[in-house]
Image: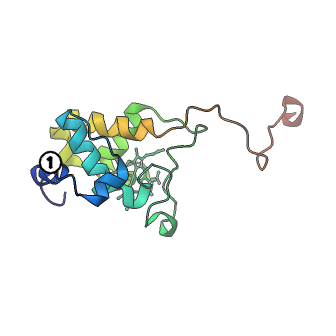
Amino acid sequence: MRGSWLAVAIALADPDDGCLGAFDAEVPSDPSKQLAQALWTRECADCHGLSGAADGRSSATLEPRPPNFVDPCRPISDQWAARVILEGGASYNGSPAMRQHHALKGDPAVLAALVRIVQDFRATTACEPKPSAPAVTPAELD
Ligand code: HEC
């Protein structure tokens, strides 16, 4: 974990911080949410994108690419999100680029707020089948 969260909290209080301002103009009042949001911007957005759309600076160079959290067709559970954040991709044969964050075990409120950030990126529109992936009809399965 780079830097201290206290320093992050102090940085958050600075209205001139361009990076955080770009993420969200409205700073939440809950300290856990503030820390989670600062953590997202500093530690996660590079790969996952500021708005979770897998369009961060490093997204394109990763193989596999990070998942697009905005996609309504691939919902994940809170439990799965928390597990991957805590234990990292290597814990389930996923990408080791997604590191473990064991330090968050001692801060369940920040972990929960981080999970909310991830979950709230998902578009509320219905999942439409993509033209490139035609639906398989029962007849085709015979
Ligand atoms: C170095 C790039 C990188 C960073 C930094 C990073 N991630 Fe990831 N993340 C990934 C990749 C790649 C995956 C896909 C892992 C896999 O299943 O192969 C992933 C997977 C995930 C998943 C599981 C999503 C799913 O649909 O299964 C969650 C949740 C997640 N990351 C949240 C975070 C959070 C929160 C942070 C910051 C604390 C973070 N990530 C930091 C690259 C990154």
Q: Could you tell me which residue is drawn at 40 percent across and 41 percent down?
A: 118
- Residue 35 placed where, x, y %? 21, 44
Label 1 sits on a secondary structure element that is helix
Q: Nearer the viewer, residue 41 or 129?
A: 41
Q: Could you tell me which residue is drawn at 44 percent across and 55 percent down?
A: 49
User: Where is mark 1, residue-wise?
Assistant: 9
Q: Nearer the viewer, residue 92 or 113?
A: 113
Is residue 62 visible to us here?
yes
Disc 1 beta carbon < 8 A from ligand 1?
no
Q: The C terminus appears in which quarter of the rendering?
A: top right
Q: Quadrant of residue 124?
A: top right
The answer to whether residue 65 is above or below residue 53 is below
Which residue is at the far front?
Answer: 16
Q: Nearer the viewer, residue 104 or 119?
A: 119
Is residue 97 visible to us here?
no
Disc 1 residue type? Ala
- Residue 47 placed where, x, y %? 41, 59
Q: Could you tell me which residue is drawn at 11 percent across and 54 percent down?
A: 7
Count of marks placed on residues: 1
**Viewed as shown, does residue 128 lie left or right of 123?**
right
Q: Could you tell me which residue is drawn at 52 percent across and 43 percent down?
A: 70
- Residue 28 placed where, x, y %? 26, 36
Q: The N terminus appears in which quarter of the rendering?
A: bottom left
Which residue is at the far bottom?
Answer: 61
